[in-house]
Image: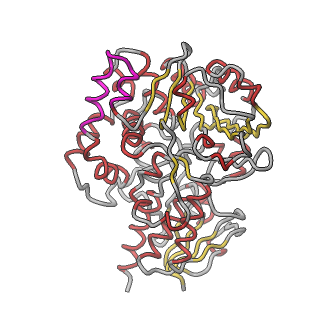
Amino acid sequence: MLDAVVVGAGPNGLTAAVELARRGFSVAVFEAKDTVGGGARTAELTLPGFHHDPCSAAHPLGVNSPAFKAMPLHRYGLEWLHADLPMAHPFLDGSAAVLSRSVGETAASFGPRDAGAYRRLVEPFLPRWDTLVRDFMSLPLSALPRDPVTLARFGLVGLPPSTWLMRRFKDERAKALFAGLVAHVIAPLGGLATGAVGLVFALAAHAAGWPVARGGSQAISDALAAYLKDLGGTVHTDYEVKRLDDLPPARAYVFDTSPTALARIAGFGGHYDAYRYGASVFKLDYALDGPVPWTAEQARRAGTVQVGASRAEIGAALDAASRQGRAPDPPFLITVQPTLVDPGRAPEGKHVFWAYGHVPNGWTGDLTDAVERQLERFAPGFRDRVLARATAGPPELAAHNANYVGGDIACGAASGLQLLLRPKLSLRPYATPHPAVFICSSATPPGPGVHGMSGHNAAKAVWRRLRQEP
C-alpha cells in the first residue's frame, strides 16, 4: 500500500508529492492530461517554433516561494530569467510608472508627490521579507509565525481594502499601478485584504523580481516532476480519476483539484456547495513579427506590462466582469513579454506575447477586438506585428484545466473572506470530511499563483496524520 496518492500534477500537487517523498513516504501522482503542469505548461499554440504559456507566464510568487527555494529545482533545469524591469504601467501620454527591483526607481516613477509615501509603505517590510513571506504564505495555522510582530504590522496595512491603502497616494500614477497589482487576483478594488494583494506583488518584485522560466512555465512543472522521480515517487499521466475506487490503495489521498471536483470524486455531497467561483479571463497568445511597439520606453524593457489608463478604468473593468456580469470595454489587460529575455522561445527576430482581460465566469463571447483596441492605445501599430493569435475564453480555459471552473483561473473567487479562508471557514483548510482525504489546490491558502505553497502546507497536514498512525 502506498503512503499517499496525489490527484493532479499541477505545481501544488507536485509540490505536495515532493514534500512527502522527501520525508520518506511512498507517493504516486495521477494526472488526467498527457503531461504534467496544470497552470504551468508550455505549448506551440500559434505557429511552429513559437512556445507559449497557455496559463501563467511570469512568476513573482514562484521565485519568492519558500517551498521552491527549499528544493534543488535548478538541478532539474529550472532557470529564472529577469527583464530589465519586472513590470511597467504605461499611460496615454507616453510615460510609465514602473515596478523595479529598486524601491528608489519605483518611487521616482510615481513623481515627487508620492515617492515618499511609497517608500514609507514598502521599506519597513523589505528587510524582513523572507520571514514575512513564509509566515504570510503558511497561513492559517499550518505553522506558527516566525515574526508575529511584522506579520501583524503587515495585516494592519493589508487587511483593509486597497482603496484605503491608495489614499496614501496623491497622483494617478501610483494609484493606477497599485490598482493593477490588485487586479492580478481578479478582485474588486474595494474588497477585504486587497491592500495585502497589491503589497505582496510589490514587495515580491523588490525582493526577487517577476521572472519567467527559461523555455516556458512547463520548466517549473518538469523540474518538480523530475525531482519527485529521483526521490522515488511516480507520475502517471493520461489517468482520469472519476471516483476514489479508480485509485490504488493508500493511507492518504491528496487532491490538487477544485473543491467541487473533489466532492464529486470522493462522494462528499454538498460539502463545498457554498464555495464561490469568480470571474474569468479572455486570453490571447500572439506570435509577433517584432517586439510590441509600446509608446512608453519603459514598457519595452519590462517582462510584465499592465495596461489600464487610470485607477478608475481598471476598477470599472473589474466591476464589470465580477459584479455586473458583462465584458468590460475597455478591458484592463495584464500582458507578458517572455522573449525579451528568452529569445529561444520564438524563431530568430520573432516574439511571443501573452495578454488577457477579465470577463464574467462562463462568458462565451469574443474579446479579441476590445483587447487589441486597448493595446493599440498604448502600442500603436501592434496589430501590424501579429503573425498569428490563439484565443481562449472561459470555455476553452475550463477545457484546458478542469480546476478553472467557468474559466476562473484562481480556482475560486479571491474576494471577501474567501480570499483568506478557503475553501471553507476553517483552521484546517486542507482537511476534508474524510480523515484520509486532503485538498491542496489553489482553492486552499495561500490561494492562486504558481508557488506550490498550498501543496507544501497540505503536505504538512498529511505527514502529521501519517506519523500519528500506528
Residue 14 point in image, percent of width and height: 54, 65
Quarter placement of the C terminus: bottom left
Q: Is residue 110 magenta?
A: yes
Residue, far front: 348
Residue at left offset 53%, top offset 34%: 302
Quarter placement of the N terminus: bottom right
Q: Main secondary structure of the magenta part?
A: helix
Residue at left offset 39%, top offset 15%: 171
Residue, far left: 149
The relative height of residue 130 versus residue 316 in the rendered view (above or below) is below
Residue at left offset 54%, top offset 67%: 76
Q: Quadrant of residue 29?
A: bottom right
Residue 408 point in image, percent of width and height: 60, 43
State left or right for residue 285 relative to residue 262. Answer: right
Q: Quadrant of residue 368?
A: top right
Residues 226 and 178: in front is 226
Residue 31 point in image, percent of width and height: 65, 66
Residues 361 and 332: in front is 332
Q: Is residue 262 magenta?
A: no
Residue 378 point in image, percent of width and height: 61, 20
First to last magenta residue range: 104-124
